[in-house]
Amino acid sequence: MSVPPDVSVVIPVYNEEAGLPALFERLYAALDQLGRRFEVVFVDDGSLDRSGAMLREQYQRRPDCTQVVLFNGNFGQHLAIMAGFEHARGRVIVTLDADLQNPPEEIGRLVAEMDRGFDYVGTIRQMRQDTAFRRVASRMMNGLRERITRIHMTDQGCMLRAYSRDIVDAINACREVNTFIPALAYTFAQRPTEIEVRHEERAAGESKYSLYKLIRLNFDLVTGFSIVPLQMFSLFGIGISVLSVIFVIFLAIRRLIVGPEAEGLFTLFGIAFFLIGIALFGIGLLGEYVGRIYQQVRQRPRYLVRAVLAPQDAALAPEPEAPRALHRR
Ligand code: UDP
Ligand code: MG
């Protein structure tokens, strides 16, 4: 295993015990068929079920082409992928979900596209198999991101993607705490392309994203790649100020012509509540940015690795992110 593999497949795993056997079977079959040197880098994101143990077993079965990074807690899908990237040694790096929503059989098509000289292969899910709510919400966020960032993707949500060594090296040099891998990678891409891939229903288990986590993730995507929301806010503030000055002048003149009036109380309430709502949203939005700056400047380790299972020369290659014995503060 001293020669680096051609293809590295990075897979974050969080409580996926029900689906892992099927994943192992289909993934390794598909990769064996590729006829290239490959490795699979699993990152266990602090699973509470048997996933960690199952990954160890899989490592025993295929130690020549498997690495397992075990986290010391749940740090989230995107940081798990980051850790996988630090250990991946391939020329092409493919990311994949563990729940078989992205068919492993499609990896070959992504790699073929990379061979044609692209450095970033994005994907568009044909007939996406998710709930209607997820599809609609995701289309809206996709549209918003398309408008306010410089990142262009048809379907931002699909994790089955391929990146070049250079892009992954650039990502490894980043120290972002809250990030969205496909978007971060896109900022480094020089020749991106997209292909359509199949999408399946979750093979087993349930989605690890609650509505709350989805909202947090989308804030990461928007605040991490754009300050347009903040700029819109100041523009909106200017607009409201101008309008209220005009309104005050109008009322003053009206007071001179018509005399004192006390109508329109509820209109006033309506306008006041609307503006209070906007102001609260603005403070919250500011907080989203400030909170991220705070997390970033503290420079705590982004994730803690409990153990790495890897063929010896592979384990030596990457620098571990943090001292192993550190406890979470
Ligand atoms: N995942 C993870 N850490 C988390 C949440 C999810 O590593 O905190 C993994 C999960 O095991 C899966 C992938 O990220 O491999 C995508 O998660 P999921 O399928 O639940 O998301 P959805 O398809 O609902 O967007
Ligand atoms: Mg899924």
Image (cartoon, rainbow, N blue to C red):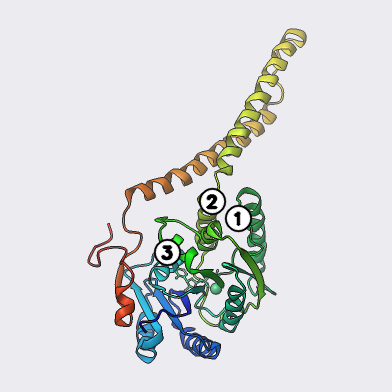
Label 3, residues with CA under 10 Å away: few <14, some 14-19, many ≥20: many
The residue tagged 3 is 79
Residue at mark 2 to residue at mark 1: CA–CA distance? 8 Å
> In the rendered image, which quarter contains the N terminus?
bottom left
Judge left or right: residue 34 versus residue 147. left
Specify the quadrant of the image occupied by residue 161: bottom right
Question: Disc 3, disc 2: CB below 8 Å?
Answer: no
Q: Position of residue 148 (x, y in %)?
A: 62, 48
- Secondary element type, mark 3: helix
The quarter of the picture showing ligand 2: bottom right
Quadrant placement of the C terminus = bottom left
**Label 2 close to label 1 by CB (< 8 Å):** yes
Residue 151 - label: 1
- Residue shown at the point (49%, 63%) measured from the top left: 167
Tag in front: 1 or 3: 1
Residue 287, percent across and down? Answer: 46, 43
**Residue 155 picture location, percent across and down:** 64, 65
Distance from the alpha carbon under mark 1 to that under mark 3:
20 Å
Q: What amino acid is labelled 2 in the image?
A: Phe
Which residue in the protein does label 2 denote?
225
